[in-house]
């Protein structure tokens, strides 16, 4: 689908497609609240808002991304609320039935990219977990009872680390989808660096993408378990 994408805003790729495919398998009640955190162009917000009977909120720390997401949803006649801010900060404690996340996860540099750097769309620190860990820690407080998080990232970042953090936060977490994907331009440019970091073997030009689902038990279930 056509999406306006200003410079410095993440281009939807295989990870977005994999996340969208898993989203399509999730059952949502009428009136369900869905959050697309780190929306970028609004690709997942568009997918979510096309589901009948759901209300969609999208958030991004990049003002360019916010404007792109607003445009890409408005031209389709989709009633998506798009807000500017860092992860969950601007949401004032609101909870959601489903949170979808495709955060930056490419292993980058020790110094964080500047606010206007194009690398901000993908650079997630030396191990690529700078934002992943924050999502794992903060998302549970924004899930309604019985709600779920769907998060996609590369297996190079450590799937077990994500599962462990989500479980420590009280969620039931597991991998629901995997797909091998050839490197795009950013990963090809960083291949040598990834090899030096021990994250990638010689001759590799692809990665495994994973979608993790993490569920929050509802209150009634927790009472029965006591």
Image (cartoon, helix red, strand yellow):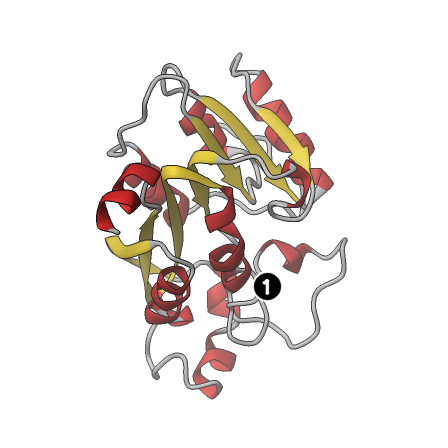
- Location of residue 66 by image quarter: top right
Q: Position of residue 98 (x, y in %)?
A: 40, 36
Bin the neighbour count of mark 1 within 10 Å (Cα to Cα): few under 14, some 14-19, many 20 and up.
Answer: many
Farthest residue in the front direction? Answer: 226
Image quarter hosting the N terminus: top left
Residue 205 visible (yes or no) = no
Total of numbered circles in the picture? 1
- Residue 31 percent across, percent down from the top left: 41, 18
The outermost residue toward the top is: 77
In this view, 49 is above or below 178: above
Residue lying at 41% horizontally and 44% vertically, measured from the top left: 16
Relative to 10, does residue 184 appear above or below in the rendering? Answer: below
In depth, the one of 140 and 209 nearer the eye is 140
Q: Closer to the camera, 161 or 40?
A: 161
Observer-nearest residue: 117 or 20? 20
**Residue at 38% of width from left, 38% of height from top?**
145
In the rendered view, does 169 fall on the left or right side of 9? Answer: left
Please indicate, yes or no, whether residue 113 appears anywhere in the rendered image. yes
Secondary structure beneath dot 1 equals loop
Tell me which residue sits at (35%, 37%) in the image.
Answer: 20
Which quadrant of the structure image shows residue 175? bottom left
Q: Which residue is found at the position 43% from the left and 83% from the top? A: 195
According to the image, label 1 marks what residue? 123
Q: Position of residue 216 (x, y in %)?
A: 35, 46
Q: How far from the left and from the top, in percent, is residue 3?
A: 53, 30
């Amino acid at each position: 689908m056509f999406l306006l994408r200003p410079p410095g805003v993440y281009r939807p790729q295989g990870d977005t497609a994999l996340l969208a495919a898993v989203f399509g398998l999730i059952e949502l009640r009428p009136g369900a609240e869905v959050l697309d955190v780190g929306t970028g162009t609004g690709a997942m917000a568009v997918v979510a808002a096309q589901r009948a009977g759901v209300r969609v909120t999208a958030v991004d720390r990049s003002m360019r991304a916010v404007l792109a997401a607003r445009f890409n949803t408005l031209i389709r006649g989709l009633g998506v609320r798009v807000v500017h801010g860092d992860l969950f900060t601007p949401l004032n404690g609101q909870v959601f039935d489903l949170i979808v996340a495709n955060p930056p996860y490419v292993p980058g540099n020790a110094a964080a990219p500047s606010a206007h750097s194009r690398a901000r769309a993908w650079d997630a620190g030396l191990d690529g977990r700078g934002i992943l860990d924050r999502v794992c820690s903060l998302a549970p407080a924004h899930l309604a009872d019985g709600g779920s998080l769907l998060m996609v990232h590369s297996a190079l970042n450590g799937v077990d680390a994500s599962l462990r953090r989500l479980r420590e936060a009280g969620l039931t977490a597991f991998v629901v989808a995997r797909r091998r994907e050839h490197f795009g331009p950013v990963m090809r440019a960083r291949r040598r660096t990834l090899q030096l970091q021990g994250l990638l073997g010689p001759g590799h030009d692809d990665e495994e993408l994973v979608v993790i689902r993490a569920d929050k038990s509802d209150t009634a279930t927790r009472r029965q378990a006591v």
